[in-house]
Image (cartoon, coloured by chain):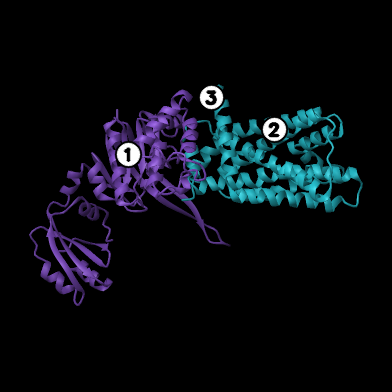
Chain colours: A purple, B cyan
Amino acid sequence: MSAIEARDLVRTYKTSTGIFRRRAVEVQAVRGVSFEVADGELFGLLGPNGAGKTTTIKMLITLLIPTSGSANVLGYDVVRDAREVRKRIGYVFGGDRGLYERLSALDNLRYFAELYAVPPADQRRRIAELLELVGLAGREKERVEGYSRGMRQRLHIARGLLHDPPVVFLDEPTIGVDPVGARELRRTIASLTEAGKTVLLTTHYMFEADDLCDRMAVITKGEIVAEGTPRDLKAIVADRTVIEIETFGVDDDAVERVRQASGVTSVSIEEREQAQVLHVQSPAGTELTQRLLGLLGTTRIGRVAVREPTLEDAYVALVGRDA
Amino acid sequence: MTRAARLLGMGWLFHVKMLTRSSFNGVLGIVYPLFFATVAFFMYRAGNADALFYASLGASVMGVWAATSTAAGAALQRERWHGTLELLVAAPANFALVLLPVTIAMATIGLYSMASTLLWGRILFGIHVHVEHWLLFCLSVPATVVAIGMLGFLLAVSFVRYRTAWALGNLLEYPVWLICGFLVPLTLFPAWVRPISWALAPTWGMQAIRESAQGGTPIPDLLVCIGLGLLYTAIGVAVVDRFLRAARARAVLSLT
């Protein structure tokens, strides 16, 4: 039996627009998502903002009822057996929200320990263990409002693990955390599967997914477009080459000329301080460098390199996003 | 049973602690009693001592209701903004046991407002509240606070279901002051208002407080007040799961 099973999950949001003439609008955030996560696996759900990752996770943790389709966690249906599911899962989301800021980390953890029915006799030991695990031991009596984002995120993880759940859902846990803090968080996440837990992680950081996940699914516009191990996904672009062109002040017209050039499969732009690095994908063996430099016209060019495709390139190819 | 009692107790303590850490609430705690005591004094200064006594006790309970009606809505909306409402719902604990201590904690904070209203009235306007039956008075006050907290719980259940229902709390603040007889005797209202007043626990709690202070018979009022509080709780518990399910179906537990 899989730890997590999603079958044709669909979720539609109903909103309305207009002030005097209200008009109902339906937005389909998730359109028939299906996947399975094996016991003890770290499964990644990758996708750009608005792809449907958080909506999918919220259906699995019982916060949203699916419009259609079904899902179960450890054999319990997320709609019918919501309370049984809640007892067995931990939920951690990214960002500053989700904590009682005026109170200390210890107060927060004690309160959630009560909500998750951690036996009173075990609470002190369990909280001490988790504070040690996430590196907040010694800071637990400080008010959360004084914590850095990384510390808050680690506190979130401690809160999500209070009742020692076998399944943990992590929704973009490293978002907005500085590189050193994010590395520590990734180490903590990796330790969860070492402890035998099943983890579903959503992220849009490819290196994070590559580093942590046993398997992953790429979701875009509410649909899963690829699923497999990081190696499987990289294989999607194995027949391609990536040309990296460092530019300074490249304009939209020049990028569009590059995008329209024959032999170019996709273009993405990465901002690096003053520079904009174009990642141009093309079929392997195609020599495009000189032609692309010509299309960039008077744009100031820095370093140019040709490299093998990475997971991020596979992701860009899959989501068809030219960012 | 022990687990439920512990969750209620710990939840109450946690939320009282959090509410007392707010400097904004602290300022309101000073300004509101001053305002309530001033209103009571100016309304009844032309009357006799009994009228002033009537109004000062009513003004003191106004703070308890204000803390519960407006603050319950605002607090639930704050939980929604801060993303903690989703975490409370995602916990396996019975949601009624999670929500009830929140509103009772608010009513408890209102207790401070009650005491300080009486103190302001005494210091600034020389209104002396003489209590005949201290024991019954000390029973009536917490019973009224808890019953108001239970009414707040019933409101809070709707605040969870409807994203904009926090405005309802603000809307109810002044009518309840009026129709529960905090400042104006119920006999002055049209007959059709009275059944509404009788259905509200603060009406009976207020009468119990006044009766015990004046040496009357507060026990019947006290029992009705507690009974209504329990009825609100029973209704809230009965509908909370249905409302939560509707909130999950309509995706109103968070702002995004």
* Residue under numbered circle 1: A200
User: What is the three-letter code of the residue carrying label 3?
Assistant: Arg
Q: Quadrant of residue A202?
A: top left
User: Is disc 3 placed on a helix, strand or loop?
Assistant: helix
Q: Which residue is mark 2?
A: B229
Tell me if A217 is positioned left or right of A140 in this view: left
The residue depicted at 35 percent of the width and 41 percent of the height is A170
User: Same chain, marks 2 and 3?
Assistant: yes
Do the numbered discs 2 and 1 sit on residues whose CB atoms are within 8 Å?
no
Please give the name of the residue rendered at 12% of the width and 53% of the height, measured from the top-left corner: A239
Measured from the top left, where is residue A73 in percent x and y?
A: 36, 32
Q: Residue B78's spot in the image, x, y percent? A: 54, 48
B204 horizontally vs A2: left or right: right
At which x and y percent is residue A254? 23, 72
* For residue B145, above or below residue A293: above
Q: Are marks 3 and 1 in contact (CB under 8 Å)?
A: no
Image quadrant of residue B127?
Answer: top right
Q: Which tag, 2 or 3, sits closer to the chain's start?
A: 3
Amino acid carrying label 2: it is Gly
Residue B233 shows up from this direction:
yes
Disc 1: host chain: A
Q: CA distance from mark 3 to mark 1?
A: 31 Å
Find disc 3 in the rendering and name its residue: B3
Disc 3 and disc 1 on one polypeptide chain = no
Residue type pointed to by label 1: Leu
